[in-house]
Amino acid sequence: QLACLSDSARVSSGPWLSLSYNPEEGKTRVKLPSGSKKIIPSTSRAVVGVVAGGGRIEKPILKAGAAYHKYKAKRHSWPRVRGVTMNPVDHPHGGGNHQHIGMPATKSRHAPAGQKVGLIAARRTGRLRGAAATAALAAKEREKSKN
């Protein structure tokens, strides 16, 4: 049996507004707190609001142990050791009397698997200048504000 959602709606971030209800099609048109209007099935059951735990990544990781436990639960991606600090048997960038790559960092897309380190199939290298630099900076700011 289909029921109107207006009497059973609960929203954490503001008022819920049921705009229209169509019993033939079983659809209800609702207005969410963000202002967007959606058509949803009348049989739907949901709690609309903000997901818990927001802002968790805004706190800085102050200790190495905190980073260790964070990535231990995810995957083995911490600590990340640079290739130039390794020996030549461990990485193509390793070895030498100083920490330097010693060869161009760009590699072909068709290079064998053991050589594919550094900038793989790079379209361009070097410092971004002009409009490209401005666009890259804006994209980085957008990514930072999104996370």
Image (cartoon, grey):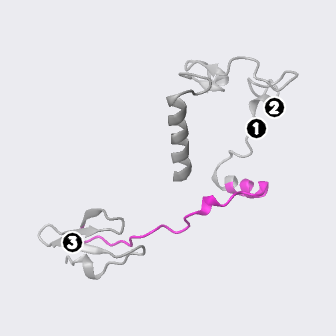
Identify which residue, 58 or 93, lies in the foreground.
58
Label 2 near label 3: C-beta < 8 Å?
no
Q: Which residue is mark 1?
A: 81
Residue lying farthest right? 97
Instruction: Tell me how far mark 3 sits from mark 1, CA to CA.
Output: 57 Å
Magenta extent: 41-70
Q: Which residue is mark 2?
A: 85
> Residue 117, how many percent across, how many down?
66, 26
Residue lying farthest bottom? 7
Label 1 near label 3: C-beta < 8 Å?
no
> Residue 126, how many percent across, how many down?
62, 23
Q: Residue at x 62, y 26 (%)?
A: 127
Q: Is residue 37 left or right of residue 25?
A: right
Mark 1, secondary structure of its residue: loop
Q: Is residue 2 left or right of residue 78?
A: left
Q: Which residue is mark 3?
A: 19
Q: Residue at x 58, y 28 (%)?
A: 128
Mark 2, secondary structure of its residue: helix
> Residue 17, how many percent across, how many down?
27, 74
Of the residues tagged 3 and 2, which is closer to the observer? Answer: 3
Does 52 sit above or below residue 100?
A: below
Q: Quadrant of the N terminus?
A: bottom left
Q: Residue at x 61, y 58 (%)?
A: 57
